Image (spheres, helix red, strand yellow):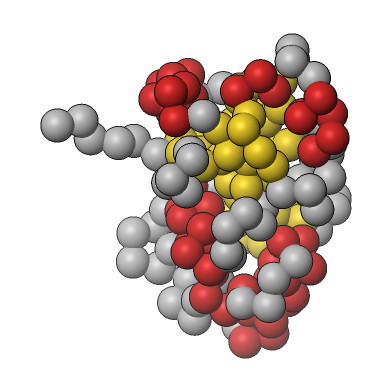
Amino acid sequence: MSYVRKPTNEELRFLRSIMNYQFMIDEADKVITDDVLLRVSKNTGRIRAVLDGATGKTIATLVASTHTFNLWLEGGLRLHRVVPKPKLRVIVFNEISDGVVEAKSTVFAKHVLSIDEDLRSGDEVLVVDEDDNLLCVGRLVLSPDEVMQLLVGPAVKVRECVKYESG
């Protein structure tokens, strides 16, 4: 069980410092804004998730054992606006971008056009098309070198995808 509440200033600083460190940015205050809400465990009092204050959508969940974020679509959209291309991005071919969004499970290495070389296996990533449109957020399964050299196997385990309206 959990409950939702406003964060304290100290909690905001704590969460922003994690975001800055994990995603190698200096603008976490644009991702975790002052109007966010926190989902907190009733049993332990620990922060479990950061939510958008207006919509209630999950920005990111906090992994208690590692104090790192699992990024959700709302957080991916915010991060995508802040971080310049190609940072944190896995770029897939435009021809398969619709299939990636529909499948919502895995981006395979053979579909990757390019990738941020500074990423490491296990990092949270933004999956984008060639035009830098955000498609999905997920976790990198392989190192960037492996993704670009291998023609088989998963590259990104997708967590959540954008729902594009057709027409």
Quadrant holding the C terminus: top left
Q: Is residue 96 left or right of residue 40?
A: left
| Direction from residue 115 to residue 105 in the image, left or right | left
Q: Residue at x 80, y 53 (%)?
A: 118
Q: Position of residue 52 (x, y in %)?
A: 43, 63
Q: In the displayed image of the protein, which residue is found farthest to the top?
A: 152
Quadrant hosting residue 53 = bottom left
Image quadrant in which you'd find residue 120:
top right
In the foreground, 75 or 92: 92
The residue sitting at 39% across, 25% down in the picture is 98
User: In the image as oriented, which residue stretches furthest toward the bottom?
Assistant: 9
Count of number-bearing discs: 0
Residue 152 visible within the image: yes
Residue found 23% across the figure and 35% down from its top: 165
Residue 83 falls in image quadrant: bottom right
The percent position of residue 108, horizontal first and vertical second, equals 65, 20
Q: Percent from the top left, x then y, of residue 81?
A: 47, 64
On screen, residue 6 above or below 76: below
